[in-house]
Image (cartoon, helix red, strand yellow):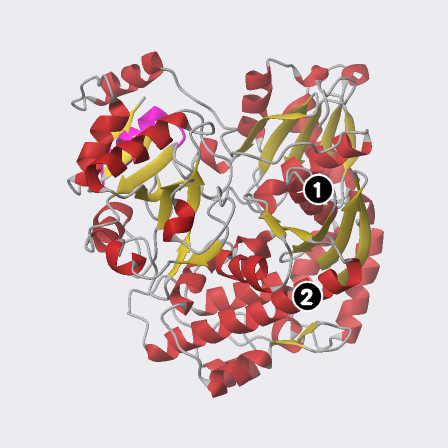
Amino acid sequence: MGDGKGLPTVMGLLIEGCDPSAALVHEGRIVAFAEEERFNRDKHAMGVFPSQAIAYCLEVAQLAITDVDVIAVGWDAAKFPDQMADFYKTTRRLHAPCSDFVVRWQDRNVNRYTPEVLTGQIVDHLLSGVPDETWPKIRFVNHHYAHACSSFFVSGFERAAILTADGHGEDDCTHFWVAENGKIRHLREWLLPLSLGWFYTKFTQFFGFHAHDGEGKLMGLAAYGKPVDTLLANVRKVLHATGDERIYDLASRFFYGEFEASGPYTREWIELFGEPRPLESREPFNEYYKDLAFAVQHVFEEACLALAKQILAETGMDKLCVAGGTFMNCKMNGQLAKTVGFKNFFAQPAAGDNGVSLGAALAVVGEAGGRPTEPLLHTYFGPSYNNDEIEAALKASGVDYRKSTDIAAEAAALLADSKVVGWFQGSMEAGARAMGNRSILANPLNPEMSNLVNNKVKFRESWRPFCPSVLVEDGPDCFDYSGDLPFMIVACEAREGVKDRLPSVVHVDNTVRVQSVRRETNPLFYALIEAFKRRTGVGVVLNTSFNVKGEPIVLRPAEAISCFEKTGMDAMAIG
């Protein structure tokens, strides 16, 4: 954003929600960005104030909180309590009868996001003991505007259409925006309960997965299904693309109506889809559930594609930016990128609420005159550890280790021999994906490797897919895309013959969630893949996050060692 001189130093925060985080933008540059879950080891850290993430941001910038000009919070607190109380009252009237569950949720929200509550949290956790006159200004930023800023201001685009969608913002859930001349202008909104996020999350829970965590599992399961007309018709009773000015519609009765004792499902829902699966059930999914998952994903894509086509028609822009938890669905993103007609497509890699802290900070900087000039090239904004810190952790653990003179080449040799390698290097990634600094790596040529890593290393469902990390120059030869896909957030198809050659990174429907790796962005990870290519002829490795099911990605050396020791990894390359 220019040379950054004269721009405010902004601490962006997402508090009171899922995946609280902090991001620091100083002189127009992202200095640090991290989620609280990585520090406190509580996955998603629901409702936790991001104290440790804030402390890290200040530490890496070598700033005190009094050096920060603005604290930007990704909620429009001015709407609470009065405006939101009126809105909820109206929705209860329009969508009656409302279940007690919905009424309780609304009543909690009315007083959860008020300026007094959110400011009080900031003061208690961050400004206690700090003289009032030295406090940063506290700004409240509309939730979806923060999503929009998180994508556009790091896209590298001068002009773009922006689409945001998630479970909910304040009273809203989907938006059209347009960005030009460094400014983002609002075009259109969809209010609750027309939530694409609610649609996908309710089905996620119905399949026995955790809300706000298992949506990717549902997306992966959908690839095993097939189109069944009756299931598609039933799912379209919940959500459907309308073909008119509404673009899509969601049947509020399934979300606000009276729920059955078995969970947040109406009697009509159960008549359409059956009883919900138990949470974390270990029973295999039968063909009905696979086909239902296919229908959910297909109908979801229909609605999202309809939105993208409409914003293209309304704006005439040839570039599209997206953000909001809805766009963590890489399969749908692949459809948006390929089929709608945009020349360029950018999905914020931290598309969920974890990215709202970054977006809130960028919103304030943008309003102060900051202008986007370069695209986001990486997500390595988290803590790093030097070799002395790593060796101290190794000694404390008692694990056997030795020093390497060429750790990339040695790791590549192990991978070529079909060993599973933990890879802990450099700064931790922000966002949900491991981009080659906190990764578990394996050989994609070995057809047994995906089952082995799922069952003996990650301890997760055997049908879940893995991502290929590929040398940027080799990617288009293996996978059907052009340009660059550095963030594992856009799916594409494997080219002919690649599934047979790389069976452990190509999903059952021939799709892949690619990470293209550049030497200048991550030289050590690039060197590893390059060394693997010299041994195997293929510049691709299987890459999954360095964690086990139910835990956040590892942050510190001690956590990497602990994860290594309790899994079936063969080796760990650390430091």
| Front in this rendered view, residue 282 or 424 | 424
* Mark 1: secondary structure: helix
Q: What range of the chain is rendered magenta? A: 555-567
Q: Amino acid at mark 1?
A: Cys
The residue at which mark 1 appears reads as 149
Magenta stretch, main secondary structure class: helix
- Which comes sooner in the sequence, label 1 or label 2? 1
Task: Specify few, some or many for label 1: CA neighbours under 10 Å numbering under 14, 14-19, or 20 or more.
Answer: many
* Mark 2: secondary structure: helix
- In the drawing, does residue 278 fall left or right of residue 444? right
Q: Amino acid at mark 2?
A: Lys
The residues tagged by marks 1 and 2 sit, at their Cα atoms, a distance apart of 21 Å
Task: Specify few, some or many for label 2: CA neighbours under 10 Å numbering under 14, 14-19, or 20 or more.
Answer: some
Residue 308 x, y percent position in the rendering: 67, 62
Quadrant for the N terminus, please. top right
Residue 182 x, y percent position in the rendering: 79, 38
